[in-house]
Image (cartoon, rainbow, N blue to C red):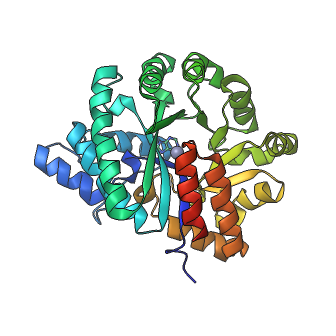
Amino acid sequence: MTYQVMPKVELHTHLEGCAPPSFIRGLAKEKSVDISGVFNADGSYSYRDFDHFLTVYEAACTTLQGPQDFYRLVKAVLEESASHGVVYQETFLSPDFCGGGDVEAWRDYLAAMETAAAEAEAEFDITLKGIVTAIRHFGPDAAKPAALCAAETFGDFITGFGMAGGELAGRPGDFAYAFDMAREARMPLTCHAGEWGGPDMVADTLRDLKVQRIGHGINAVRDPALVDQLAEAGTVLEVCPGSNVFLKASGGWDQHPIKTLRDAGVKVTVSTDDPPFFGTTMTHEFNMLSQTFGWEEADFKDLNQTALNAAFCDAETHTKIAKRLEA
Ligand code: ADE
Ligand code: ZN
């Protein structure tokens, strides 16, 4: 059994991290950008560990130089996601890579991405929403303009605010100003935590940033009281098992905490994070979870429903996607 055609809801992807290697190589050639060190001889992305992954990721991003490049990227990414049954996807978009945090420049990039998403919806039958994302290792001062870009463009396409990047840079409370700004604009919130940090990072993120969802969150499993707290509060974890296994945030598929967390009543969802960087797809994630934990169609339907309930989209989109999951 392969789960390729099953409709899927995916909440946690990074747009640039979804770029196929051939796409980045093509842009680099067109623009004569030096991307030496970004790829292995076999054409795959090349990095040693998570910190080096972030460096290579940012080097790949130097080929994305204007709104038109992001238009092309969105089209390429959505065609690929749709081929794995994804009907609804949320993706992290970083003003830092789209005009450097300037709101007017950000609007131009966003317009191009929205156009691409609308065209992809018509061509590939997939809905995309964007979550404006601060990059943690760029520091709290860079998070503020990102939050301003988010608040200024919150609407139909931009549906939330979040933070990715090096999790061990600073403490969650250092970023409270940016998250407060987004919350005051009534934006739903998410933040990476508990991918590299311990349960304390997840707890502090919930306390200081007041997010509804946590990116990864897997290390919460080390603290049973926190697991109970997550279950009781209904906090949703955007779990990316293939990413965790590939980057060695988890010891292996058979040791991955997603099952323990789900069995404890925590709302878990499944995503790919940065699929070509981690050799994964949503089909691969479902297939591996099925092989490892014996999860079946009913389990995946349940995961999809949890993801849709936690999606940051409007009610009309929610209803439309719910119908596609039933079909
Ligand atoms: N940016 C892209 N992928 C990421 C990940 N897995 N964790 C944190 N930041 C990221
Ligand atoms: Zn991520």
For this orientation, the residue located farthest to the bottom is: 1
Q: Indicate the position of residue 313 as horizontal and vertical percent values.
A: 54, 43
Q: Quadrant of residue 188?
A: top right
Instruction: Say which quadrant the N terminus sits in.
Output: bottom right
Q: Which residue is at a point 51% across and 57% down the rendered structure image?
A: 272
Name the residue rendered at 69%, 48% in the picture: 218
Q: Position of residue 123 (x, y in %)?
A: 31, 62
Position of 149 relative to 131 (above/below): above
Q: Is residue 165 visible?
A: no
Residue at image point 11% right, 49% down: 30
Task: Judge from the rendering whether residue 260 lies leftward or rightward of residue 300; answer left or right.
Answer: right
Camera-side residue of 110 and 230: 110
**Number of marks in the image?**
0
Identity of the residue drawn at 48% across and 28% down: 137
In which quarter of the view is residue 276 placed? bottom left
Residue nearest the viewer, comparing 256 with 289: 289
- Position in image of residue 46 (x %, y %): 36, 54
Q: Quadrant of the C terminus?
A: bottom right
Q: Nearer the viewer, residue 30 or 99?
A: 99
Answer with left or right where residue 50 lies relative to residue 268: left
Relative to residue 2, is residue 114 depicted above or below?
Answer: above
Q: Position of residue 208 (x, y in %)?
A: 69, 23
When asked about the image quadrant of residue 285, the answer is bottom right
Relative side of 253 to 181, left or right = right
Q: Is residue 106 visible?
A: yes
